[in-house]
Amino acid sequence: MNEHFITEIEIKNFKLFKDFKAEGFGRVNLIGGKNNVGKTAFMEAVFVNVCAQNLESFIGSLQNIKYMREELNILSNILIERSKPDVTIYMEQSSGINIQSNKNDICFMVNKNNGIKSYHFKFNGKTIDVSANEFSFEVDVIPNIGFIDNFGLPNFRIKLAYASVLKKDKEQFLNDILYKFDNRIGKFISVDTPQCRLNGEWFDLTELGDGTKHLVSIVTSLFKSENGYLFIDELDNGIHYTQLDELWEIILTISKEQNVQVFATTHSKECIESYARVAKRLGDEEITFIELCRRENEIKSFVYPYSWFLDEIAQEHEVRGCL
């Protein structure tokens, strides 16, 4: 296991998680569970933790996860009210969070004293206190940490990710993958906008199905996340169940070659079974399945390592989540 991978985490006061611990993660980690149990929130907490390499990247991660959750509402407000979202609101909604892992220990609190508001940060034992009036709200992005929501990446992020494909001379590799998923697709390019050549005619990627956009987002992001992390919400969105084995082989193979730790969510039994089947065929033991459950109003986790997970699937046990 690579030393930069997250193997354990403790989450306090972050969305649904009041006091949560889990450990034993692998290179690739699939997260299952019932609706509203916190699968996406769990990934967001890990995302914030690994992004908190400095104050600016920590603020950037908080902003990014809020934007992804509220993308449609934010766009509506900009179009109707001609106003941009207030970053301070997003930050202050996160007051009190504490996320510790084997790589990072972060804490954020909004303090008010005699009518004066200040922001209290703690990164790996180093404390930073800043007056709210003096805070710059500058943000930073860690290039090799990616998060794909269930809509896939927007065009500008696909273009950035595709640049990594070009640098590694993997254009034909991506074209071959797309052809396997849809033999009408001859080529992918991303100059002004991401496009695919379909039966000899060029179409914007947004004009094709959600599955094609999701697939391009995943493959390009795996290359962009070399020696980093990739988070994928609703991994199988738009992907037909008959193509899941091919998708998992791509993820397991590229993540190993590029040294990327992957966290992904799904509701699908077919996706979970395909994950186990392909990991077994490839002999890839650096995988886990994380089952999230709600017990007595607390979120609990069961982290299945390779052999235990394969045994549960072989015995046809239910692993998609419990009440």
Image (cartoon, rainbow, N blue to C red):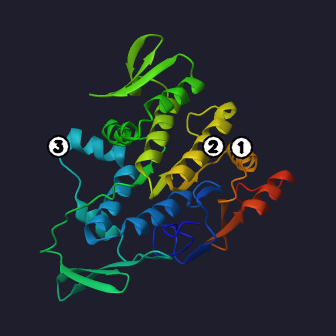
Residue highlighted by disc 3: 82
Q: Position of residue 95 (x, y in %)?
A: 35, 75
Q: Picture coordinates of residue 158 (x, y %)?
A: 37, 38
Q: Is residue 205 above or below residue 14?
A: above
Check if mark 1's residue and mark 2's residue have beta carbons within 8 Å.
Answer: yes
Task: State which tag comes first along the sequence, 1 or 3.
Answer: 3
> Around disc 2, counting alpha carbons within 10 Å, would you say few (fewer than 14), some (14 to 19), or many (20 or more)?
many
Marks 2 and 3, Cα distance to the nearest angstrom?
A: 42 Å
Residue 166 rendering spot, x and y as whole percentages: 37, 36
Q: Amino acid at mark 2?
A: Trp
Residue at position x 61%, y 58% in the image: 29
**Furthest residue in direction front, as rendered:** 169
Q: Do the CB atoms of the residues marked 1 and 3 lie less than 8 Å apart?
A: no
Q: Quadrant of the C terminus?
A: bottom right
Q: Which residue is mark 2?
A: 248
Q: Which residue is mark 1?
A: 274
Q: Is residue 315 left or right of residue 287?
A: right
**Which residue does the image show at 29% across and 28% down from the upper left?**
191
Q: Earlier in the sequence, mark 1 or mark 2?
A: 2
Q: Is residue 311 visible?
A: yes
Q: Which residue ends up furthest to the top in the rendered image?
A: 200
Q: Front-most of 16 and 205?
A: 205
Residue 317, labelled with which disc? none
- Gap between marks 1 and 3, in whole Å? 46 Å
